[in-house]
Image (cartoon, coloured by chain):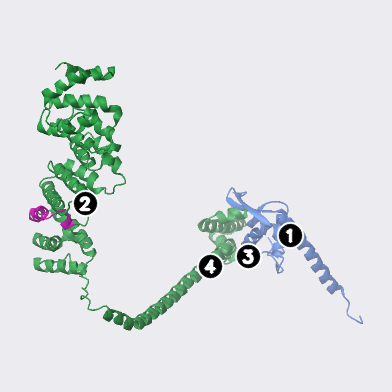
Amino acid sequence: MAEPKSELLQGTLHMLILKALERGPLHGYAIVRRIEESSDAFLRVEEGSLYPALHRMERRGWIESEWGASESNRRAKFYELTNSGRRQLREELAGWERTRTAIEGVLRAQPKGA
Amino acid sequence: MGWFESTARSEAQIEAEIRDELEFHLEQRTRELVEQGMGADEARAEAERRFGSVERVRQSCRRVQLGERIMLQRIQFVLNLVLIVAVGVLGWRYWQSNASVQDQLHKLSQLLEPRAALLAASAGPQPPHSPRPALERFKALKDPAAAAAWAEQMLAWESDAGPGAMNQGWHSVESPQVRIALLAPFVTRGGHGRAIEILHLAATDRDAEVREQAFRFLKSYAFQDFSGKPLSIYHEWHDEIGQKPLGDALTESAKRYAERLRAASGAPLVRELVLIESIDLEPAQVRGRDVLHDILWSGGEENLYNRAYRWIESDNTEIQFAGLRFVAHFPQLAEAISSSVLNVVLAWPWKSPALVVVACRALAACPQLPMETNSEVSLHLLRFCVENDTPEVRQAVGSGILERLWRLPSGSERGAAQWIAWWKENRAQFSDPKLLESEDARWLDAR
């Protein structure tokens, strides 16, 4: 596996977690793996910051958790998106889109007199 | 997991879940690294390195999960602190205000003292105020002389507190002589409201010598010497009154009381009460107690009728005697309950002749006798006189009731033979079949 190349941009962890959970319940390690795989191992989630973020999101009602059996039949805590989390994901994606557009706009701008 | 479930879990449970979750993550990463060819220990170390500080993450998760609880605990702590401070401030302010009131009272008393002194001076010389005896010294008394002095001091102080304290500590005074020394001043001085309680303590004392002294006091003094409420001893000593020799001592004391009353008053009612009392005291304890309770202790005349009725209807012959003698002094009362009195007459021969004599004296006091029973009662009394031909019966019945009932000439000197002769001469005057067929009429006819 290629070594991740980049840390997450600040403020994007919640969005990436929500997006990772969009396709169904996952435990914490699987969320990390999905983010890494979806980015072709480019993005690296700081594992230590994942779990406080998950718990915080759960407190906010964006996700909910339930203990279940993992693929290795080990007891694991699975997180699932709530309706509130889906709305939050849409808002986060929209915000990200605006940010990306703004950055692209800045990057496309030609220097005066060029 | 919902908010409610989350808040319902204990702190220990939440911490265990966090630990499990983090451990699962590390295990998964370790397994992945092992699958990639790394040694187990090396893989675990690498997993932990990537993860960062497990303890820091655990603490972060804990703060998120328990943040509200921690906040509530802190709020509770602060509120408790505020409450304690508030109570402290209030207490301090109360103390301050109390001190202020005390100060004002002190100033007021200083202001009034000269006026009080003036008033005292205008009222003339006052007896010296006795200091309050030290109650706490009572149990520690070892010497009879000191005990007597203590009791004298208590009497001088004129308070019921002394006997109250003695009630509580009497049995803890070791020396019998000290207990006797404590007893004597209260009893021999007389008039102390609670001397009777001290006497009771002594009369039921564990030591025979003390008990004997109490009995001697009982026999030597009348009840009112011990108590402002004569005969209350019968109430207060209910459990002991049937016991010898205490019961005998009580009876002796009651007799002294009766004698004193008899000598002191000439009023018919009091005389009669004393008479009743003395009669009922002779057989002592039980009967004396009951009768005295009814007649003397209950007091008041508002229930006189009911009480007299109850005595006369009593199964106890002695109480019937007392009741009949009592109502003889109250003509209106005797008349009101004359039917009960007549029932006593008709109860002969099942009741004693002496009782009928007393009943006749009560009837003699009535201004007007119940006419509807005249014939029956008269006939019964006639038979009674014939069968009980004694001077006492002639006096009570012959010259009183019969002549009033039948308007007979004075018959105080009539004997049995004369009554029989009278019956035979006058029988024709009676036409009532019930009367003529009665047992009494048949008995008289047979004479």
From the image, state whether disc 3 or disc 2 is nearer to you. 2
Q: CA distance from mark 1 to mark 4?
A: 32 Å
Task: Confirm whether circles 2 and 1 share one chain.
Answer: no
Name the front one of labels 1 and 3. Answer: 1
What is the three-letter code of the residue carrying label 1?
Answer: Gln
Q: Where does label 1 land, which residue? A: A88
Point out which mark residue B74 bears: 4
Q: Quadrant of residue B284?
A: top left
User: Is the C-beta separation of discs 2 and 1 under 8 Å?
Assistant: no
Q: Is residue B446 left or right of residue B65?
A: left
Q: Chain of mark 2?
A: B
Q: Which chain is green?
A: B
Q: Chain of mark 3?
A: A
Q: Position of residue B429 (x, y in %)?
A: 24, 20
Please rate how many residues cluster around mark 3, counting C-alpha atoms within 10 Å: few if below 14, some from 14 to 19, many from 20.
some
The amino acid type of the residue labelled 2 equals Ser
Rounded to the nearest angstrom, the CA distance separating label 3 from label 2 is 91 Å
CA distance separating discs 4 and 3: 26 Å
Residue B252 coordinates in the image, percent (x, y): 11, 49
What span is colored magenta in the figure? B208-226
Q: Do callouts 4 and 3 mark residues in contact (Cβ within 8 Å)?
A: no
Inspect the magenta stretch and tell me whether residue B373 lies in it: no
**Chain holding disc 4:** B
